[in-house]
Amino acid sequence: MNRDEVMDRYGIPMKVLMEYHEWGLCPAVRMAMDEWQYTDADIERLGMIMALHDIGFSVSEVESFMRLLLAGEGTKDERMKMLNEKRSEALDEIHLKERQLVRMDYLRIQIRNG
């Protein structure tokens, strides 16, 4: 599958494809007739990159995670630690939003009761 097909079919932005290439994570991507060609394994890795971006990983965190992933099973604990840290950050944000909602509702009740 060429670059344009990957972008169209899977909604992967050019920025992510460029990151993938710049990091050297794409040994299987080859040039054929002046077009990047992606394998199913490349598309799976690109999907992982998109998921990591979506859950809030920075570009450098994504690169670190992907390098660990490609290094194999021996990095499982490190990858789990990264995900646990990101999960903890997300929970902190959720709890903050919950507190904000409680305060907001309190103010709404005060306004209604005048």
Image: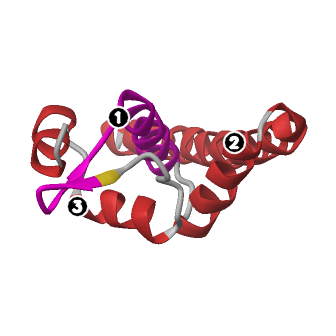
- Residue 60 appears left or right of 27: right
Q: Residue 9: x, y in percent?
A: 14, 32
* Residue kind at label 1, given as amino acid type: Thr
User: What range is drawn magenta here?
Assistant: 31-55
The quarter of the picture where residue 71 lies is top right
Q: CA distance from mark 3 to mark 2?
A: 22 Å
Q: CA distance from mark 2 to mark 1?
A: 17 Å
Secondary structure found at label 1: loop
Name the residue beneath numbered marker 2.
69
Secondary structure found at label 2: helix
**Residue at screen point 60% across, 68% down:** 60
Name the residue beneath numbered marker 3.
14
- State the residue in front, 71 or 28: 28
Name the residue beneath numbered marker 1.
39
Q: Residue 54: x, y in percent?
A: 43, 45
Q: Residues within 10 Å of mark 2 (few under 14, many from 20)?
A: some
